Image: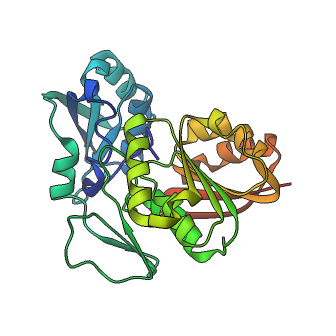
Amino acid sequence: MSCPNFYVIKKLCIFANVMDTPTMNDYYQVDFSMAPANVDACDYLASELADAGFESFVSNDDAPGSTLQAFVPAPLYSAAAVDDAVASLPFDVKVGYAATFVPGQDWNSEWEKHYFQPIVIGGKAVVHSSFHTNIPQAQYDIVIDPRMAFGTGHHATTTLMMTYLLENNIEGLTVVDMGTGTGILAILAAMRGAARVVAVEIDKAAYDNAVENVACNLASNARSVDVRHGDAQAIADVEEAQLFLANINRNIITADIAAYARSLAEGAHLLVSGFYVADRPIVEEAASRAGLQLVGVAEIDNWSSMTFIKK
């Protein structure tokens, strides 16, 4: 999945998708201070900034709710938009900010060197990059070299999605992974025995990265994963899918959920994530209109996943 627009992500994930295209390699870093500290206000501010084109966020683990760093491609930066986002906060807080121009660089290299460490999910899957050493042993060993794509298992939403795949029997299923990013969920689904996986990514750099990662991890079984460049229209030919994964963001999910539902077989499951617990009613309403019924929820650090069944 490409980095969801409104993620408030931790420092170890900040460079995961800082550059979408080479022409957008220059960034503005905007540092916000908030008094009194208010985690909910920081989350709300990040969501508003995402609507103004901001892509990545770093919260302060040592003093939660007191500071927020936000990154936006330089061509998209607007001080007026930032002022509007701050003014929209429905919280009694004082917010100050300063913007700094950050020249383009190899963001992925910086992220790999300083932030991406091997991680074990659910005691069963280890995710690491090709340059890592001292890798923990696990039943499923996944190598992810992220390039410019999001998805290493470190963020709560990716962990939620991977945990579902590890805890449920998907052997022999046809699976769709919408917004595949690095391809991590598609790879794990194939490793867990899915008969066919259709992985879709709208960002060209992320698509290319997913193709590389699928080939690296699945070798002779790589053909079981069909990686496609596009959006929800790319699954127009998919019928009777038995599991649909979408770890993107609330707005895209609610806009495209009807297309997701059309690709599902009756009784099949849709698993979505990339939004806050507070967003569940909005997602559930959109899903209900598409003929989907909520059957389960999970959450980590206020991030949510939701499981629906096609009636």
In the image, is residue 79 above or below residue 162? above
| Residue placed furthest toward the front | 220
- Horizontal side of 226 relative to 294 (left or right) equals left
Residue located at (29% from left, 47% from top): 147
Is residue 160 visible from the viewing direction of this image?
Answer: no
Q: Residue at x 43, y 49 (%)?
A: 211
Q: How many marks?
A: 0
Pick the residue in front: 279 or 249. Answer: 249
Q: Position of residue 257 (x, y in %)?
A: 69, 41
Q: Position of residue 250 (x, y in %)?
A: 57, 41
Within the image, what quadrant is residue 112 found in? Answer: bottom left
Q: Is residue 88 above or below residue 176?
A: above
Residue 128 in the image, given as x and y percentages of width and height: 31, 67
Q: Nearer the viewer, residue 68 or 297?
A: 297
Res 13 seen here: yes
Compared across the picture, whether 219 is left or right of 295 comes to left
Question: Observer-nearest residue: 227 or 135?
Answer: 227
- Taking the spot 63% from the left edge, 67% from the top edge, the residue there is 194
Residue 58 appears at what percent x and percent y? 27, 47
